[in-house]
Image (cartoon, helix red, strand yellow):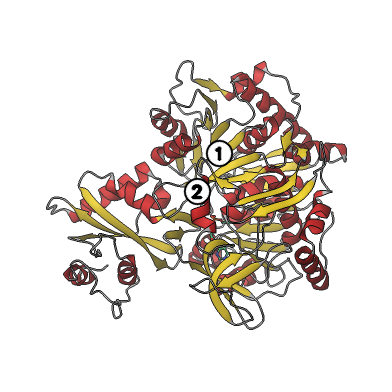
Amino acid sequence: MKRITSFEQYTTEYKKSIDTPEKFWSEQAEEFVWKKKWDKVLDWNFDEPDVKWFQGGKLNITENCLDRHLKSGKGEQVAILWEPNHPEAEVRKITYKELHLEVCRFANVLKRNGAKKGDRICIYMPMIPELAIAVLACARIGAIHSVIFGGFSFKSLADRIQDADCTIVVTADGAFRGTKDIQLKGIVDEALEICPSIKKAIVYKHIHADINMKNERDVWWHDEIKFVSSECEAETMDSEDPLFILYTSGSTGKPKGVVHSTAGYMVSTDYTFRNVFQYNDGEVFWCTADVGWITGHSYLVYGPLLCGATSLMFEGIPTFPDAGRFWQVIDKHKVNIFYTAPTAIRSLEAMGLDFVKPYKLDSLRVLGSVGEPINEEAWHWYNDNIGKNRCPIVDTYWQTETGAIMISPLAGITKTKPGFATFPLPGVQPVLLDEKGVELNGNGVEGRLCYKFPWPSIIRTTYGNHERCKEAYFATFKGYYFTGDGCKRDEDGYYRITGRVDDVIKVSGHLLGTAEVENAINEHPDIVESAVVGFPHDIKGWGIYAFVICDNERKDEDNLKREIIQTVTKYMGAIAKPDKIQIVKGLPKTRSGKIMRRILRKIAENDLSNLGDTSTLLDPSVVEEIKAGAL
Ligand code: WTA
């Protein structure tokens, strides 16, 4: 496997990727199996936006994830190594050959149930190998997968199914999470009542729950599989055909369906996986993210499989049966590369070293961090106690919209600094802009992080609404892709992400739109209006602070708060539960009715001294009341 092996080489490759991007990326793309080679490497225009990579090329990404490895003699190697929720339950080891077979069979099941190229298929599954199989089976037949994180509940699921007009949902009877059983099928049933586009639900039996199967609509995975052959020709796809939709939160209540294309996504995920983690053949790579998020798509499924790696998939949670589970799994499966989120690191740090001490952790070679800024304390804890000061840490910065890692050290090659994502990967051209959109040159500057040139796995559109893609990413600063993040470039040219500068909050590494959480809170019959902001949280990075107006005098505030939490859990999912709820009489609004979130943010952060100018408020007295009741 070709990869960068020294910092000097990184510097030359980086330069090459900037001076001659087309040449650089076509060299990377040549490694793959193409049904027909591309005619043109790149066409782009950030104003529309309109970006096309490897136009005229024909391929199927699953041939590159699977068939290619069978031909090169990797058939017997484990592709997916599955660790169940319960430590005593049976491990599953699925070789490349077996995975190929299962993907082909399930692809035929999809076809048998009416799926065609271009159809949208929703996947709402536990973290079991069948989730990866379903994803790849969609890609095999050219259907567009839309994976919804299993922690979302029925309304979030329904909104996403409706937005993409999905025709099939692939799900399971339920999921095991720690000591809990999650009744996934019940949630699907509730969602499907308001999703008429769904014609079929294919259900995998996993927890043996007692569920309802609706005649005509619902079929069992294990029944269907009996009727199909295990051969399935890979559909011929254009380079720019959409591979998947993945929803991410934005500043309105409606999540955005980020669309990724086939060839560009393939080239970027493969390239970044190899180079960032410095993967060696035969190593066990463990990404702890759920496939419901982009990290799971790119570094649990596609990136590792494209590189012929062994990808560990874990069904459970870090604290079951105790807070040593991650470390136990690392020893058990001799994990070489471990990739997780700062929230997980901080919460395990808080449990104490007694949970780490029993384990050797000597198989580890590289550690990774993703999803949110990693604070220095957590970085050192991770480095000292897990990496034992001998494993490089790669702090990988990227987004659902970028498809692949953008700014990150190369393991063992880039000199790291705690809290810094370090340098852009080859092909990535970051710039920092001031509020007016002027580029800040040189080092020792801080601004809004943008990119001025496309990379292969850049977002192509937001499903069904191209204007929204333009608005959200390409309109703020003309001619640039805007990340929504603040960033510093220090005296040595190292990049450090300072966090979001818009109305989304990173809670435990999950991106949540404040408007989406407000909508869920407002489903409570007694709530007239609410405003949600983030506040710094020791473990989760950011917590959710909700200010709510109740329309009748409720004396039992504690009960009301409990009901609000239940409502949010029911409509959106437990990940969006507010940490603090303050019942208020009014919200600080401008005369035109806009909520001044800046003031609420300060109150939530407990920074009451300097609330800024409140004179433009319709009723400045509400601020005093809110301040007095601040939690
Ligand atoms: C944040 C997750 C600091 C950032 C892959 C970004 C990070 C958002 C890092 C995207 C990091 C991700 N350091 N912040 N290493 N990685 N972020 O779409 O705010 O779930 O814009 O993709 O996470 O979140 P998303």
Q: Residues within 10 Å of mark 1 (few under 14, many from 20)?
A: many
Label number found at residue 321: none
Count of numbered circles on the image: 2
Q: Which residue is mark 1?
A: 146
| Residue visible at 67% across and 53% down in the picture | 44
Q: CB of mark 1 within 8 Å of CB of mark 2?
A: no
Where does the image place residue 593, in percent across and percent down from the top left? Answer: 25, 59
The amino acid type, in three-letter code, at marker 2 is: Glu
Ligand 1 shows up in which quadrant of the image?
Answer: bottom right
On the image, the x and y values in percent for residue 411 come to 73, 66
Residue 460: x and y, percent? 61, 48
* Residue 330 visible in image: yes
Q: Is residue 281 left or right of residue 107?
A: right
Say which element carries label 1: strand
Ligand 1 closer than 8 Å to label 2 CB:
no
Q: Which residue is mark 2?
A: 467
Q: Considering only vertical position in the picture, is 361 above or below 208?
A: below
Residue at left offset 48%, top offset 58%? 508
Under 8 Å from ligand 1: the CB of mark 1?
no
Residue most toward the right?
A: 72
As measured in the structure, the alpha-carbon distance from the residue carrying label 1 to the one carrying label 2 is 20 Å
For the point 55% across and 39% down, which residue is it? 146
Of callouts 1 and 2, which one flags the residue occurring earlier in the amino acid sequence? Answer: 1
Is 192 displayed left or right of 32 in the figure?
Answer: left
Residue 386 figure quarter: bottom right
Who is closer to the viewer here, 205 or 302?
A: 302
In this view of the protein, which residue sits in the foreground, 48 or 10?
48
**Residue 622 location (% of width, % of height):** 19, 67
Instruction: Give the amino acid at mark 1.
Output: Ser
Q: Quadrant of the N terminus?
A: bottom right
